[in-house]
Image (cartoon, grey):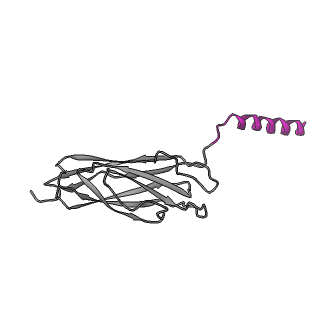
Amino acid sequence: MKNTMKISMISALLLFSQGIPAVDAAGKVVISAKNIEAVLETGGKVNIDVDMTENPGFNTGGITISYDSTAFKLADVTYYDVPNDGSAPVSSADGKYTIVMGDMSGGTMYEGTGKLVTLTFEIQDEAEAKTYRIDIAEPQSKVWYDYDIQEVPVSITGCTVKLDYEIGRAH
């Protein structure tokens, strides 16, 4: 009788566990940048930190930055824990730049969170006192992969830059 009860309990547990949806243990990479305000001065610099707040681990990844090239020129990209892995030299003639990072050879797994890159923009002559959108997105071709060459899902949020003559100045 005891054995029959044990078998019934085990069978019930097995049936019950099959009805529970699987948990996505892999997770996803979450990247974002905060909205900022800056003084509108031709030649002035605007630094935007792009942060990774969730990271299940990846070997390679990339982001494409799109912005108004009449208002901004991408002057520099500073990398932190995840190195540049084949990005073209910084150029911003068309208002779009793709950053490729990680280890294309597949030898290193990046699992930390924190500051991913800092984008440094120079304010151009044509910039106006208004809010500009800085779009940050996954490149058209998928580039986020893990050690097993499995695609890693990503969620990327851009930011805005408000340029004004009075920001940060005493009134």
Residue 61 within the magenta-colored segment of the rendering: no
Q: Report the number of numbered marks.
A: 0
Q: Nearer the viewer, residue 151 or 31?
A: 151
Q: Residue at x 20, y 61 (%)?
A: 43
Q: Position of residue 41 (x, y in %)?
A: 16, 58
Residue 170 falls left or right of residue 143: left
What residue occupies the far left of the structure in this picture?
171
Q: Nearer the viewer, residue 56 or 14?
A: 56
Q: Position of residue 101 (x, y in %)?
A: 48, 59
Quadrant that contains the C terminus: bottom left
Q: Residue at x 23, y 46 (%)?
A: 131
Residue 145 falls left or right of residue 168: right
* Magenta stretch, main secondary structure class: helix
Which stretch is magenta?
Answer: 1-22
Quadrant that contains the N terminus: top right
What residue occupies the far front of the structure in this picture?
93
Q: Position of residue 93 (x, y in %)?
A: 30, 54
Q: Is residue 143 visible?
A: yes
Q: Nearer the viewer, residue 72 or 36?
A: 72
Where 158 falls versus 80 (above or below)? Answer: above
Q: Residue at x 42, y 60 (%)?
A: 88
Q: Nearer the viewer, residue 18 or 147?
A: 147
Q: Position of residue 75 (x, y in %)?
A: 30, 62
Residue 135 falls left or right of residue 152: left
Q: Is residue 54 visible?
A: no
